[in-house]
Image (spheres, rainbow, N blue to C red):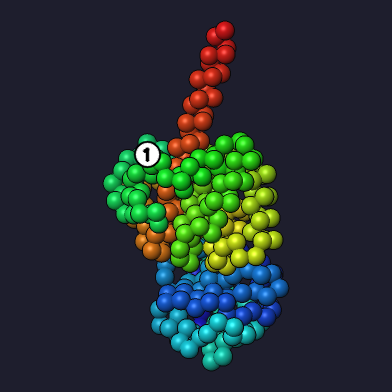
Amino acid sequence: MIQAKWIDQALFEPTFINGNWIVHSVFQHSFNLQDTRQDQLICVSKQAARVPKGMILAADDYAALATGLVAGTALLVQQRVIHFPHHRLSFQKAAKFTTIFPAGTVPFDRELFWSALQSVTEKTGIREAVSETIRSNHPFYDAIDQLCTPSFKEQRQAVAYLVGRGVGLTPTGDDMLVGHLLARRVMGQEDTRLVAYLQRRLLTVNDLTTDVSKHYLLHALTGAFNQSALSLTRCTDSAAFYQVIKEILAIGHTSGADFLAGFARSIDQFQNNRNEEFIWQNEWSSL
């Protein structure tokens, strides 16, 4: 019996005790399972990244499970034990982690974050350095700016532009959108209308984006993010920011860079909007 090392505590919900699952997709370092009742993805990986609905295995255990595994394979889950064709995987006693952003805003040192970001020369999916994010006039960033406005019309236009746009398992526009959604929580700018609209689009429009990207977007809408992203919101000094940014940049080909870009551009926009509102209020009160 193979034992999972770490697991998102959300997988201890009753929904995942028993059921019929299938292998959704298989990649070099991970494979995804799907709960056919709930239409959710469960990511099984040998990498240390802790993601929503994720399990982490020892490298040898992962290799034993992944060898010969193909999409469409039917699996049976009984008492949190997954029955594969030649092995069994238990996640009953795995150590738990959380991917949920805490309720309410968190203290976030934007100046330290900007300082750390200036040294990031890695390129995003639009082939611009992350350090150029705030100064760029690229259409992707214009769409992020639209998302940061209170105009529902502009937000819908931005969603139409970003979702599914770009290449890869998680397209650039989607990764930037996940960064935007985390920035909203950090800055106390949650927008229930935008969340409801985006959720409805993802659940009702076929082929809007990839299944894996849809998985992460839907979780971001509920406040669940990978742990590296959550760690970014808890940094209190420059060294911590540099380390966490390094970890995020290691995610995917450009996914980490794209997430950082969407997060940074949104933080900057929300801060500028606040400053403008503060200036306007002071000018009005002086009349």
Is there any visible trace of residue 11 in the rendered image?
Answer: no
In this figure, what is the number of numbered marks?
Answer: 1
For this view, does 176 lie left or right of residue 124?
right
Is there any visible trace of residue 287 in the rendered image?
Answer: yes
Give the x, y percent position of residue 230: 48, 52
Give the x, y percent position of residue 176: 48, 52
Q: Residue at x 62, y 37 (%)?
A: 151
Q: Residue at x 68, y 75 (%)?
A: 36
Residue 99 image-quadrant placement: bottom right
At numbered mark 1, what does the secondary structure look like: helix, strand or loop? loop
The residue pinned by badge 1 equals 135
> On screen, 96 above or below 149?
below
Give the x, y percent position of residue 273: 51, 30
| Amino acid type of the residue that numbered disc 1 sits on in the rendered structure | Arg
Give the x, y percent position of residue 20: 67, 80
Q: Residue at x 47, y 83 (%)?
A: 66
For this view, does 76 lie left or right of residue 269?
right
